[in-house]
Image (cartoon, rainbow, N blue to C red):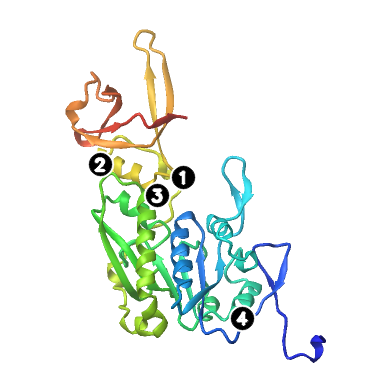
Amino acid sequence: MSLSSSPLMLRRVCSFNAARCVSSAVNPSSKKKQLVFLGSPQVSASVLDALLNASSAPDSVFEVAAIVTQPPSGRDRGRKVMPSPVAQHALDKGFPSDLIFTPVRAGEELFLSNLRALQPELCITAAYGNILPTRFLEIPPLGTVNIHPSLLPLYRGAAPVQRALQDGVKETGVSLAFTIRALDAGPIIACERMEVDDQIKAPDLLALLFSRGSKLLIRELPSIFDGSARLKARAQDDSQATLAPKISPEESWLSFDQEAIILHNKVRAFAGWPGTRARVAVVDHKSGQRNNLELKILTTRVCNSHNIQGSEVDDVTFSKGSLVFPCGRSTALEVGNHFKIV
């Protein structure tokens, strides 16, 4: 067949498999709406699974046309370059590798051209990790909807779960909101609240919120597709907004002049990454020799200050197999046997 005389056009699509360029075209006879999913870490996989399962239902009105995720990067100690957890999960599920896109920036012209070629009606984001420019947001006619693990407008930003736990909140939730250029400030379609256990850590809470968020998304998809979600979505009250800035490794140190509850919440919030660390001095009272140790703190509990048995105000004591640290305002923090000497 001569392409020069054919009404068909072949468009090059460069994707996850960088060594392979394929020709893709959207089937114009397909009645299903095209949906593009954007996500990167492991917690996003539950959202992807929910979308893939829903799209395979006999009465589904949509299909997942493509996945957008962070580029392969060096992970773990060996720094072996590996695909993002979402990309690997999609490949394990048999999703076509040529439909997994990994732009360094979501504003790259080649990526945007490939996205337009797919003619997506809707984009869904869940911890994608890249800023979406206006040129991206203008592509899907039904908009871009984000699953955000907080009760917006609270905790807008990169670390909503960690900052909420650090603040010791008793209630949090997950929000479904349209994406606009302002940070996590779009109209809210729906949200779901949940109580926060005082021992839960950030990785577990994050997974729980995205699991609930995926169910909330599937429940709201019909209204998003028929346009009624846009009508019912409520604007956020910017005057009530709080920020959840990205966490830095420098924040991981514990300062025992703070109250025990503050340190306990920090340990929960920073579990996984960057973790929490403390410096302690091992003193030999006979020789006067002093050695400093660095501990990586994994699990803590606020305990009664009467558990402190040391003769000095700064003494760290042992109680039932745990270390007990004296803290600010006559409080005490129990560090279980889940700690490491660095």
- Disc 3 to disc 1, C-alpha distance: 17 Å
Q: Secondary structure at mark 2?
A: helix
The mark that comes first in sequence, 1 or 4, is 4
Q: Amino acid at mark 4?
A: Val
What number is the disc on residue 261?
2
Q: Mark 4 highlights which residue?
A: 26
What is the C-alpha distance between the residues marked 1 and 4?
45 Å
In the shown orientation, is residue 30 left or right of residue 166? Answer: right
**Tally of numbered tags:** 4
Q: Where does the image place residue 23, in percent across and percent down from the top left? A: 70, 75
Label number found at residue 203:
3
Mark 4 or 3, nearer chain start: 4
- Residue type, label 2: Ile
* Mark earlier in primary sequence (2, 3): 3
6 sits left or right of 342 in the view? right
217 up-or-down from 70: above or below: below
Tell us which disc is closer to us: 3 or 1.
3
Kindly report which numbered mark, 2 or 4, lies closer to the viewer in this rendering.
4
Residue wearing tag 1:
249
* Separation (CA) of disc 4 from disc 3: 38 Å
In this orientation, which residue lies closer to the viewer: 187 or 125?
Answer: 125
